[in-house]
Image: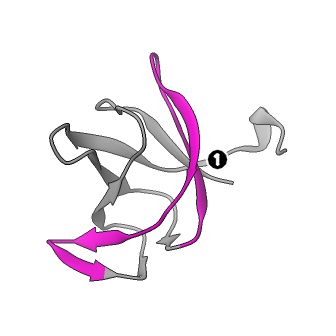
Amino acid sequence: MVPESAEKPIGRITHYYSHLSVGIIELTEGELKVGDTIRIKGKHTDFTQTVDSIQIEHQGVTQAPKGKSVGIKVKEKVREHDLVFRL
């Protein structure tokens, strides 16, 4: 396990679609790939999951570069401003 102080956020949640269980991540500090393990952490959120799929504007992709907003299926509710870390 990575010490918490060593974790650097790669992005943040900007929206959550509860009926789809999809979180929108704005990638501000790094890229994201299918298969990456991420941690989503916020005031009421803290869980780890593997990225199974990524969509950019409803198109499935295997990776997304810094600067993009992507949608991923999340296993728990996420909230705006939650931080996303790649582990």
Compared with residue 59, is residue 80 higher up or lower down, i.e. above or below?
A: above
Image label count: 1
Name the residue tied to disc 1.
8
Q: Position of residue 5 (x, y in %)?
A: 77, 34
Q: Is residue 54 magenta?
A: yes
Q: Quadrant of the C terminus?
A: bottom right
User: Viewer-proximal residue, 34 or 31?
Assistant: 34
Q: Position of residue 51 (x, y in %)?
A: 49, 62
Identity, as a three-letter code, of the amino acid under mark 1:
Lys
Give the residue at x 47% y 25%: 45
Residue 46 sits above or below residue 55 on the image: above
In the displayed structure, does residue 36 sit left or right of residue 71?
right
Q: Residue at x 27, y 71 (%)?
A: 55
Q: Residue at x 50, y 74 (%)?
A: 34
**Residue at 34% from the left image edge and 55% from the top image edge:** 73
Q: Residues within 10 Å of mark 1 (few under 14, many from 20)?
A: some
Q: Residue 42: x and y, percent?
A: 47, 25
Residue 56 is one of the magenta-drawn residues: yes
Q: Quadrant of the N terminus?
A: top right
Residue 14 position by quadrant = top left
- What is the basis of the colouring in this image? one colour
Mark 1: secondary structure? loop
Q: Point out residue 10 in the picture as x, y percentages from the top left corner.
A: 52, 54
- Give the residues in magenta: 35-60
In the image, residue 13 sits, relative to residue 67, either above or below, namely: above
Give the camera-side residue of 86 and 48.
48
